[in-house]
Image (tube, rainbow, N blue to C red):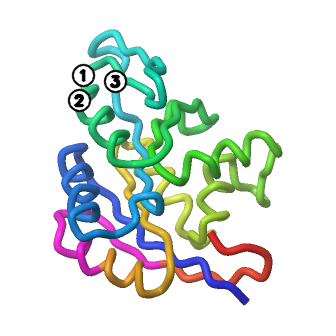
Amino acid sequence: MNQKNCVVTVYKTHVEAEEAVKELQKSGLNMKQCSILGRGFHTEEEVVGFYNAGDRMMFWGKQGAFWGGVWGLLFGAGYFWIPGIGTVLAGGALVSSIVGALEGAAVVGSLNVLGAALYSIGIQRDSILQYEMAIKANKFVVIFHGTAGETAKARAILDLTPKEILEVSEKENAATNT
């Protein structure tokens, strides 16, 4: 049996979430195992746009500096519209899981595409709804997944940040290890 280990934190602001990601980076952890999710904008505030610039996705809007900076630290960027949640901006490893769920029309039980992607990287099914609700409430979810040792190190770092929620998820999986 392989284990999927995740540390998930929820932040009220993009500033708190960005600082958490930067702390993980400074620690030397593999940033290919880190992801961030958020709504990232309010359409009534100003014009928002997205475009590709070479290998990077760019965000034009009120939080453009935040998303551009975070996407520069992480590997992968995406903009998705998910029924029941709305627009979701994502950066990091979770982007490929969301795309995989979309391409395979993967829905795990009653989970939507985002829920299926979260579940696929090791987040416990009973915690997924609270993370989706946090995103709907314009909060930011930072996820680090890896070995037990890596997630223990990430947890120690993230525990020092001003988060709302910090949870560790360990899930056995016979098929794959992300």
On the rendered image, what quadrant is the N terminus found in? bottom right
In the rendering, which numbered label is found on residue 152? none
| Residue drawn at point x = 56 percent, y = 45 percent | 95
Q: Which residue is mark 3?
A: 42
Quadrant of the rendered image containing residue 102: top right
Residue 164 lies within the magenta run: yes
> Relative to 152, is 173 on the left or the right?
right
Q: Quadrant of the C terminus?
A: bottom right
Query: Is the residue under label 1 in contact with that under label 2 (CB below 8 Å)?
Result: no
Q: Which residue is mark 1?
A: 62
Q: Position of residue 4 (x, y in %)?
A: 59, 77
Q: In this orientation, which residue lies closer to the viewer: 148 or 171?
A: 148
Against 46, is 98 above or below? Answer: below
- Residue 43 position by quadrant: top left
Q: How far apart in space, not on screen, are marks 2 and 1 (Cα)?
A: 8 Å
Is 81 rendered above or below residue 161?
Answer: above
Residue 145 screen position, x and y as percent? 49, 70
Residue at 29% over, 12% down: 46
Residue 120: x %, y % from top left: 67, 63
Q: How many marks?
A: 3
What secondary structure is found at the residue carrying circle 1? Answer: loop
- Residue sitting at 24 percent across and 22 percent down? 62
**145 or 164: nearer the eye?**
145
Q: Quadrant of residue 141?
A: bottom left
Is the residue under label 3 in contact with that under label 1 (CB below 8 Å)? yes
> Which contiguous range is marked in magenta?
156-168
Residue at image mark 2: 65
Amino acid type assigned to the residue bearing label 2 in the image: Ala
Q: Nearer the viewer, residue 125 or 7?
A: 7
Amino acid under label 3? His
